[in-house]
Amino acid sequence: MADPASRSGRHYFDADILEFAARVHAPHDTALARAFDAPAAHGLPAIQLAASEARAVELFLRLAGARKVIELGTLAGYSALRIARALPLDGLLVTVEASDTHADIAEANLAAAALVVAVRVARGKALDVLPTLEAEGPWDAIFIDADKGNYDRYGRWAAQNLRPGGLLLADNVYLFGRLLEDSAEAEAMRRFHEESAAAFDTVCLPTPDGLLLGLRR
Ligand SMILES: C[S@@+](CC[C@H](N)C(=O)[O-])C[C@H]1O[C@@H](n2cnc3c(N)ncnc32)[C@H](O)[C@@H]1O
């Protein structure tokens, strides 16, 4: 059920409830804990997904039967590890990262996880790397979690390069509460919402900062 308060944006979780739910439904083994803790351990910004959101991405990909997946924004490899674990044995994940420092740490974390599926960390800005991935398409899914001002461009690429039924996932689509502001970044994010809704069957899930989910028509 929902009630007028929750429909208006009130939520019923706090830090303790989030922690309980993550512990029950999205527990960390050694490899996940290493990747999750890596940003703090290496002095990187700790802006990886929350445990429950990363688990949701994994389960959505499993539901979609995704085999070939792209991630934009690797950081230390935490969400990449969840994505890789959603894939079948012949699966492929290409995760794109602009920072060599982040990519180095992510590669070490992914190697430590002893994954069976193929995972490539592609170094460079997503707008430069994406065209190089077109020949390997069509892709089954993309998870967008990089620079927010380019989400509209990433969404257009996804509309062109995902197979029908392919899955679009994007985090931070409330833009940290700035979605409706008058700024170039907010305009780009609103375009991303609108253009995605035109090309995909979409929903914006009200996670703390919004998770957009779309199925390519
Ligand atoms: C929010 S973090 C990614 C977190 C990661 N998905 C996770 O949950 O573990 C965003 C990452 O995107 C990278 N990034 C920013 N702009 C980028 C761009 N234009 N192309 C590729 N990566 C970019 C940043 O260096 C950072 O590592």
Image: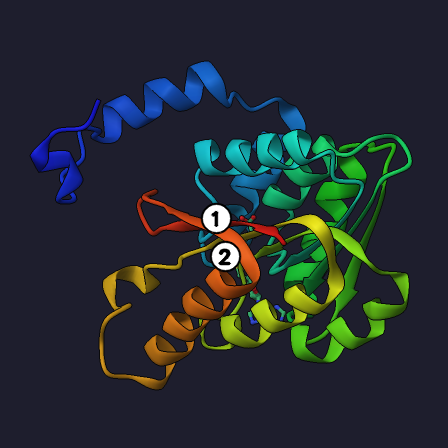
Residue projecting furthest to the left: 5
Question: x and y percent of residue 210 in the render?
Answer: 36, 50
Q: Considering only vertical position in the picture, is 69 above or below 45? A: above
Residue depicted at 68% across the width and 49% down the height: 166
Q: Based on the displayed image, in which of its 4 quarters is residue 84 positioned?
A: top right
Q: In this image, 25 relative to 92: left or right?
A: left
- Compare residues 156 and 147 and report the one nearer the observer: 156
Residue depicted at 25% across the width and 23% down the height: 16
Q: In this image, 160 relative to 171: left or right?
A: right
Marks 1/2 in contact by CB < 8 Å: the verdict is yes
Report the quarter where the N terminus lies. top left
Q: In this image, 57 relative to 134: left or right?
A: left
Instruction: Tell me the element at label 2.
Output: loop
Circle 1 Cα neighbour tier, 10 Å, few/some/many (<14 / 14–19 / ≥20): few
Badge 1 amino acid: Ala
Q: Considering only vertical position in the picture, is 117 above or below 76? A: above
Question: x and y percent of residue 74 in the render?
Answer: 63, 56
Q: In this image, 21 relative to 29: left or right?
A: left
Instruction: Tell me the element at label 1.
Output: helix
* Pointer 2 residue Cβ closer than 8 Å to ligand 1: no
Residue depicted at 8% across the width and 35% down the height: 4
Report the quarter where the C terminus lies. bottom right
- Which residue does the numbered mark 1 point to in the structure image? 40
- Alpha carbon distance from label 1 to label 2: 5 Å
- Which residue does the numbered mark 2 point to in the structure image? 43
Q: Based on the displayed image, in which of its 4 quarters is residue 116 positioned?
A: top right
Q: Tag on residue 49?
A: none
- Compare residues 202 and 56 and report the one nearer the observer: 202
Model colouring:
rainbow
Badge 2 amino acid: Gly
